[in-house]
Image (tube, rainbow, N blue to C red):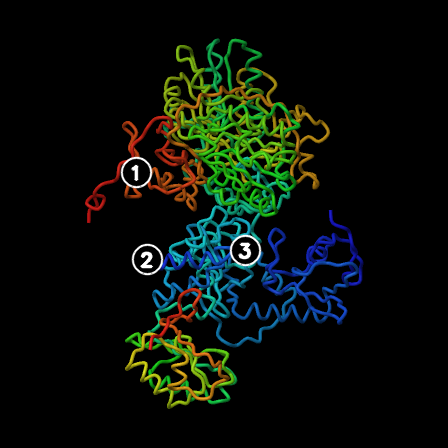
């Protein structure tokens, strides 16, 4: 069995949240991605046993959604929005700056397994376009310069937990709107930080 | 019943059930709507959009998929308007974008819905100049199925079949958008008992089978409808033959039995017909060089029979003969007895699961279609999924439609997930007896009291006292509105029971065999030395017998002991009738010529009677058929060839005869091993069919994890040791079994010699690595 007891315990807690076992499939795939940085075949076998469906049914779901990665990602997943609002606000130059800094093309990961770069469809931050997500934590109002600065910071400081507010304060520009609540939790893996499934991590500062 | 309503299709009015889909209503009225994904035995999905039709709505005309839209009163449908035609052209153009159009090398070409419908409804010309998407050309997704993803049009018929109908979803869509493909999980092949059905329902050439690939073009095939003798379900099939070779078996939609589906055994177990190993001439003393003519062989046998006045003649029959052949055998026995009263003759059926059954009350006997109308289905029998695979599909379907399923005993653990109640080791002991009073079984009464119940009842194990089964049936009869299916799973067992005056079992053969007298034994399409738990005793008796005649297709463990082997015809080479487990008689048709100097079984019986100068022999199957029809209880609707060939009777005729089985109830000793027959085994027909020969090779046993731990095992490969027998087996964990009871496959090589009532040891295979040469 490839999952350790701690992970299995988390998995069972997630399964209990749903009336049917198979409904827990989505969150469990995030656990798998948290563990390996992608959805491994071993994890698929594990999940299929946990929720009583066949391996290929799990694979069918995991390969359908692009946020479940089929290949190893780097520590930091840079998702740059290319949809219309960002495009109008010059996301092209943000994309180019990331490409230039990392030397990566779309969906590529560098050799040190530090960065994975992808161009994505709308990430729901049109008011603060152009926007970027680092491990699904959103920064809005970026400029090419600020983007490079952010990449350098990630490369040099190697922060363990990425928190959206912190990124925004450091590198962001115009925000869609201000929630006025400080959010101290972020994500530590290439998985969105959800508190109810335990992928969100609190930043201590 | 749903109400009848009227709708208007293409200007004419049609009447239809109110709960039908537009596509069904049109189909029933003879209006064809093109489709790829819709299949009448599966839920609609609206995947391919080929069945778009125009309907009138309050907001004007609208295009809707007719496979997902229900009819409503006064609905106006147009299936041929310009808009519909344009939509069909558009859909086909899209479907063909990535289709490779490799029709010249595709097996489906000629019977391909995509090809046909492109001709009929397509745009005629392609505007697509870009590169097509490419996948690796056919990849094997199991031992018998190949998948060509380029040809796939994503109709989801195969994936829906494996999920909805057979319940083993091992193929699914992977990826999405342009990259979407059907595939299996790595190292988890599409090993389903029903995988062949996906090949049949695939509307393009994406799924192909190893046995038919590149063998023929559809327009060269000769076709005939027939009935499969893979199991006693009597599935309707279509035999496809080219140049006198059987190339393919397809399922036919018989509402009452298989509803279009087949098991892979029923579908692919035919290559043996053309095996080089078939016996084509009578053989003397099991010596292939000693071939004799049919006339000589008849001479020898009839001399042997008429020489001695007081000999015992035993007939061990198998389950692959037609009703006519059983009837001819019975006629042979009766006429011989008339001439010589001192001859002691008995017919034994070679099936360890045979017992007296419940035939005394014909009102009690149920039908397969009762599955769809009763409240509760009670199952206590041998493993249904392995032995009556298409009945398993019917039960699955019934459960899906809300019928309650209650399972007893330890053989049908594969169906536990389907069941509403599974009575395992707490209720049924290791020896297949009740641990508690039937009336005390928790929650049982609520399933049966004053309910309509269909009980599928048979022996679970070759050695089993049948009193508990009888008690259960009595209890059910008293407390519910009971119908019952006698569960003997093999081929034409019911045809044998109907047409042979008295049938006994193999245990009786052993007990009644008196070696002090002269014994002549006929084995007819049966291999008791290899297919029974009494194998060793039967072998002794056959060695002891003075004269043994085997009628068979292949040399096997039994024919080795024969003085004369008579080659017989097989499925597809003979015409006759077949009776299934609900006493439905169906037609089996001949499409292949008889090979070599092979005769039908009945012809041998007739010739022997002629040699002994007895009249009353028969000249043809037709004559036999007409005669056997005289004994049916319902004289108005007998399964004569004429009657069965009527269009209204293509689904078979229900009729019964009196049945006499004489089998002694054995004491159930202490059962240590529960034998089950697996779908795939080592029958001579299967091992001589190359495409499926390897599927019955694996030797495994099942046990629960407590037993595994208690026996101090750590490895899943062990030696099963009993006396001087040692078998290397794999262990599968099955926690629905009682402690210390293991399940072993009776029809896999090596297991027959094991005594189910004696203790055994499991010894780990040590130093397996050191043994390897490298």
Q: Where is residue B279 in the image (x, y as percent from the top left)?
A: 43, 33
Residue that carries the numbered disc 3 in the rendered image:
B160
Q: Where is residue A54 in the image (x, y as percent from the top left)?
A: 45, 54
Quick one: label 2, few (<14), some, or many (20+) residues within 10 Å?
few
Q: Tell me if residue B190 comes above or below residue B607 in the rendering.
A: below
Q: Residue at x 40, y 41 (%)?
A: B735
Disc 1 is attached to a residue of which chain? B
Q: Which residue is drawn at 39% across and 82% down?
A: A167
Quick one: label 3, few (<14), some, or many (20+) residues within 10 Å?
many
Q: Position of residue A50 (x, y in %)?
A: 42, 54
Residue that carries the numbered disc 1 in the rendered image:
B728
Q: Nearer the viewer, mark 1 or mark 2?
A: 2
Of the pair B59 and B128, the residue shown nearer to us:
B59
Of the pair A165 and B755, the residue shown nearer to us:
A165
Of the pair B537 and B515, the residue shown nearer to us:
B537
The numbered mark, 3 or 1, whose residue comes first in the sequence reads 3
Give the alpha-carbon distance from disc 3 to disc 1, as whole Å. Answer: 38 Å
Give the alpha-carbon distance from disc 1 to disc 2, as whole Å. Answer: 33 Å
Q: Would residue B351 be seen by someone viewing this image from the given angle?
A: no
User: How many circles with numbers are drawn on the protein?
Assistant: 3
* Marks 3/1 same chain: yes
Residue that carries the numbered disc 2 in the rendered image:
A4
């Amino acid at each position: 069995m490839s999952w350790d007891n701690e992970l299995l315990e988390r998995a069972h807690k997630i399964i209990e949240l749903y009336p049917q076992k198979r409904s827990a499939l989505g969150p469990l795939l995030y656990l798998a991605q948290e563990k390996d940085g992608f959805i491994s075949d071993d994890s698929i076998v594990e999940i299929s046993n946990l929720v009583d469906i066949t391996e290929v049914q799990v694979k069918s779901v995991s390969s359908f959604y692009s946020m479940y990665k089929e290949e190893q990602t780097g520590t930091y997943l840079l998702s740059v929005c290319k949809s219309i609002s960002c495009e109008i606000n010059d996301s092209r130059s943000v994309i180019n700056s990331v490409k230039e800094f990392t030397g990566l093309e779309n969906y590529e990961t560098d050799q040190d397994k530090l960065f994975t770069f992808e161009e994505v469809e709308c990430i729901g931050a049109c008011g603060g376009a152009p926007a970027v997500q680092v491990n699904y934590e959103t920064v809005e109002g970026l400029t090419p310069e600020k983007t490079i600065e952010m990449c350098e910071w990630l490369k040099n400081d190697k922060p363990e937990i990425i928190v959206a507010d912190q990124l925004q304060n450091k590198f962001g520009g115009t925000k869609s709107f201000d929630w006025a609540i400080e959010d101290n939790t972020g994500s530590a893996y290439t998985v969105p930080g959800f508190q109810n499934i335990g992928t969100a991590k609190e930043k201590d500062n | 019943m749903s109400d009848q309503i009227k709708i208007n299709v293409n200007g004419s009015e049609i009447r239809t059930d109110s709960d039908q889909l537009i596509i069904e209503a049109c189909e029933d009225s003879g209006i064809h709507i093109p489709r790829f994904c819709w299949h009448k035995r599966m839920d609609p999905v609206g995947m391919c959009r080929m069945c778009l039709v125009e309907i009138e709505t309050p907001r004007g005309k609208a295009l809707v998929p007719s496979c997902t839209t229900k009819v409503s009163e006064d609905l106006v449908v147009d299936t041929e308007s310009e808009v519909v035609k344009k939509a069909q052209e558009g859909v086909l153009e899209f479907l063909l974008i990535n289709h490779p159009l490799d029709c010249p090398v595709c097996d489906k070409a000629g019977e391909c819905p995509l090809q046909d419908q492109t001709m009929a409804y397509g745009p005629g010309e392609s505007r697509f100049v870009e590169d097509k998407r490419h996948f690796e050309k056919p990849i094997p997704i199991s031992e018998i199925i190949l998948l060509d993803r380029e040809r796939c049009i994503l109709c989801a018929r195969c994936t829906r079949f494996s999920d909805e109908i057979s319940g083993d979803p091992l193929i699914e869509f992977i990826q999405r958008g342009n990259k979407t493909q059907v595939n299996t999980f790595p190292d988890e092949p599409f090993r389903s008992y029903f995988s062949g059905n996906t090949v049949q329902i695939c509307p393009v050439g994406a799924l192909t089978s190893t046995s038919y690939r590149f063998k023929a073009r559809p327009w060269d095939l000769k076709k005939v409808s027939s009935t499969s003798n893979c199991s006693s379900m009597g599935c309707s099939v279509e035999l496809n033959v080219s140049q006198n070779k059987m190339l393919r078996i397809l399922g036919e939609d018989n509402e009452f039995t298989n509803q279009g589906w087949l098991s892979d055994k029923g579908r692919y177990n035919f290559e043996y017909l053309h095996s080089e190993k078939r016996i084509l001439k009578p053989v003397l003393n099991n010596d292939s060089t000693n071939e004799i003519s049919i006339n000589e062989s008849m001479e020898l046998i009839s001399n042997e029979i008429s020489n001695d006045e007081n000999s015992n003649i035993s007939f061990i029959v198998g389950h692959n003969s037609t009703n006519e052949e059983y009837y001819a055998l019975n006629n042979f026995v009766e006429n011989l007895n008339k001439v010589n009263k001192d001859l002691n003759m008995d017919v034994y059926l070679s099936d360890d699961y045979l017992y007296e059954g419940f035939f005394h009350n014909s009102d009690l006997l149920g039908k397969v279609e009762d599955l769809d109308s009763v409240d509760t289905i009670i199952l206590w029998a041998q493993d249904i999924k392995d032995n009556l695979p298409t009945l398993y599909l019917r039960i699955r379907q019934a459960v899906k439609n809300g019928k309650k399923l209650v399972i007893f005993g330890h053989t049908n653990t594969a169906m536990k997930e389907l069941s509403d109640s599974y009575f395992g080791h707490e209720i049924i002991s290791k020896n297949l007896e009740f641990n508690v009073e039937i009336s005390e079984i928790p929650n049982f009464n609520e399933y049966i009291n004053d309910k309509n119940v269909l009980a599928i009842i048979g022996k679970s194990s070759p050695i089993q006292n049948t009193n508990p089964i009888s008690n259960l049936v009595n209890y059910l009869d008293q407390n519910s509105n009971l119908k019952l299916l006698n569960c003997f799973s093999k081929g034409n067992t019911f045809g044998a029971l109907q047409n042979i005056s008295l049938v006994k079992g193999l245990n009786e053969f052993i007990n009644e065999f008196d070696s002090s007298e002269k014994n002549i034994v006929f084995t007819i399409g049966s291999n008791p030395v290899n297919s029974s738990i009494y194998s060793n005793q039967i072998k002794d008796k056959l060695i002891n017998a003075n004269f043994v005649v085997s009628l068979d297709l292949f040399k096997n463990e039994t024919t080795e002991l024969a003085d004369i082997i008579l080659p017989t015809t097989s499925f597809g080479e003979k015409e006759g009738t077949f009776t299934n487990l609900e006493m439905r008689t169906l037609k089996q048709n001949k499409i292949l010529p008889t090979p070599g100097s092979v005769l039908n079984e009945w012809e041998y019986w007739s010739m022997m009677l002629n040699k002994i100068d007895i009249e009353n022999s028969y000249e043809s199957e037709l004559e036999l058929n007409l005669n056997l029809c005289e004994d049916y209880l319902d004289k108005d609707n007998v399964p004569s060839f004429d009657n069965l060939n009527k269009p209204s009777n293509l689904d078979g005729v229900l009729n019964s005869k009196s049945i006499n089985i004489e089998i002694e109830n054995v004491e159930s000793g202490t059962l240590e091993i529960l034998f089950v027959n697996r779908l795939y085994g080592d029958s001579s027909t299967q091992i001589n069919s190359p495409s499926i020969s390897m599927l019955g090779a694996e030797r495994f046993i099942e046990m629960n994890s407590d037993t595994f731990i208690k026996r101090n095992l750590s490895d899943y490969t062990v030696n099963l040791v009993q006396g001087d027998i040692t078998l290397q087996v794999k262990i599968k964990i099955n926690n629905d079994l009682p402690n210390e009871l293991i399940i072993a496959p009776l029809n896999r090589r090596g297991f027959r010699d094991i005594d189910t009532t004696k203790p055994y040891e499991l010894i780990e295979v040590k130093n397996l690595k050191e043994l390897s040469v490298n």
